Image: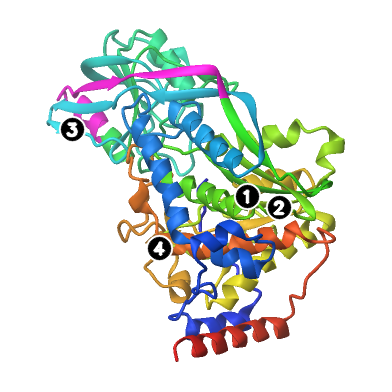
Amino acid sequence: MSHRPSSRPSKSWLVLLVLAAFGAFGASTASAAPTPHKCDSRVNNSAKKLLPCIQTADLWQHMMDFQAIADANPGPDGHPSRNSGEPGYLASVRYVAKKMQQAGYKTTIQTYKFEYSSFVGTPTLSETAPTAQDFALGTTWNAGISNGTANADIVPVGGIVLPPTPDPSSASGCTAADFAGFPAGKIALIQRGTCNFGVKAINAQNAGAAGVLIFNEGQPGRTGLFGGGTLVDADGNTVSPTIPVGFVTFDTGQQLVQDFNANKAPHAKIDVHSIIDPNRDDYNLIAESKGGDPNHVVVVDAHLDAIFGAGMLDNASGSATILDIAEQMRKVTPRNKLRFIWFGGEELGLLGSDFYVNNLPASELAKIGYDLDADVTATKNGVWAVLDPAAENLFGGAPPQFPANVYAPSLVGRDQAVDYLDSIFKPHTFFSPVGTDAFSFNVAGVPASGVLTGQDCCKTQEQVNVFGGFPGNFEGNVPSFDGGCVDNPFRWCDNLSNNDPGVLTFMSRAFGNQVVHMAFAKDLSSPIDTSPQKRQRIALGAQQRHKLAVK
């Protein structure tokens, strides 16, 4: 899911000041990594043993394998894909299952149903009169899930409000009356407003329109490109119009209205093809350690699904993180049972984790003492973030309020990741779990933490001052606020090159520090020393180790 930057200051402010001074070093305490043979043969049952064995080569091999899976399994749109409900996702599940079985874990696949949709091929829109122009998908227009081809004049329907009122008010296309006198076979131009897009599209279809273009309404915040994806009716039910549906900006729509009123007869070609399967299979992959107390379970999760393509940053990176940690801990007999889960459907609304949590018997849910979530771990222009239930809600609104038995233990895992980042001179910030699979566990009463590094919009100057890089797009593709590959459709660029292997390595170690400590925690909710004095000792100790290493 998309994560916007948190302006919440780090509670370890003293250490952040120290780290800002020494952040250029950034050397990992695991720099003297053992040989692969030594890692393969030993029992990595402590942070001292485990973290050096989390190595870039192993992580990157999994990443390359996920990319190869996406490349070999294009979606209906013709692009490499690991999206839920598509062959690339199922191939990813089978890949991870095989790796975990080879490492000695017991694996099961949990199946659930969801509503799947996809474009078939690439939708197109062009205007042929009064000016000739091709619209760029995802940049100057978006397509709605629909089917059809239209090559016709554009005719505004009733209810369009120009200039727009200060508050949204247009009911354009919301009733059949708006299409009174509409000439059949034309493309209906409709203004965004007070009813769902599916209502507008179906009304246009019933009026004999050949296609639909919906333009933004025009108030501040409602002028740019919008829409796309599935359409719903007044009751929120998905509809699939049998005519093509597209979305354009306010400026484009206003110009088309002006051309029509000036008798310039705007004319367009629009082609959209898609499929909807309301009952498609999706999968969660579950792998358990052989040892560990089954009455005290630590869930270690990442979502395996992608959105809009290969999904290498979001979230092959997190999936590779927990897969490598599981492999490196295959000889470990933990105190608490480790349950590694790769969830599906996260990008579609936490579908996999919600299904998993909500379908556990109460007695089994009560055995889960903790959840750790790895959601994006290799961002190029990122921040080093740790999940904190009290951090700013990145999707707007107040942070969720959790009871003390959820919030206080969540800080235990949080501070284990912070401890490691402090030890290698890496600053940190806190992100809310809202929008991650950890949130499904928090809502169910399970303490949770995890790590992430941000994606897409918008890295602030304040974060640049701490983490380096530049403001705007976390992924580092272009210095803008809308250049990300992850949560923007029709870009198909979240590939292997969208990841930083160095970031992937040290963030995987930070996550590994959480996992190995929780694996052996005597009480999954017991606090650890989070005092400023301990933070200072960690920072000064890391500084001394660095001085010795560079002599």
Label ID, residue 134: 3
In the image, residue 173 sits, relative to residue 453, either above or below, namely above
The structure's colour scheme is: rainbow
**Number of callouts in the render?**
4
Query: What whole-number distance in Å separates the C-alpha atoms at marks 2 and 4?
Result: 28 Å
Q: Quadrant of residue 429?
A: bottom right
Reading the image, the residue beneath label 1 is 434
Sequence-first tag of 4 and 1? 4
Q: Secondary structure beneath disc 2?
A: loop
Q: Secondary structure beneath disc 1?
A: loop
**What are the residue bounds of the magenta stretch?**
255-281
Q: Quadrant of residue 474?
A: bottom left
Sequence-first tag of 3 and 4? 3
> Please, what is the three-letter code of the amino acid marked with disc 4?
Asn
**Position of residue 530 measured from the top left corner of the image (x, y, whole percent):** 74, 75
Q: Answer yes or no: do the residues labelled 2 and 1 have beta carbons within 8 Å? A: yes
Label ID, residue 381: 4
Q: Answer yes or no: do the residues labelled 3 and 4 have beta carbons within 8 Å? A: no
User: Which residue is depicted at the point 66% across and 55% down?
Assistant: 398
Reading the image, the residue beneath label 2 is 400
> Please, what is the three-letter code of the amino acid marked with disc 1?
Val
Query: What whole-number distance in Å separates the C-alpha atoms at marks 1 and 3?
Result: 38 Å
Image quarter (top left, top right, bottom left or bottom right) of the C terminus: bottom left
Select label 3 or label 4 by which is in front. Answer: 4
For mark 3, does the 10 Å Cα neighbourhood hold few (<14), some (14 to 19), or many (20 or more) residues? some
> Please, what is the three-letter code of the amino acid marked with disc 2?
Pro
Q: Secondary structure beneath disc 3?
A: strand
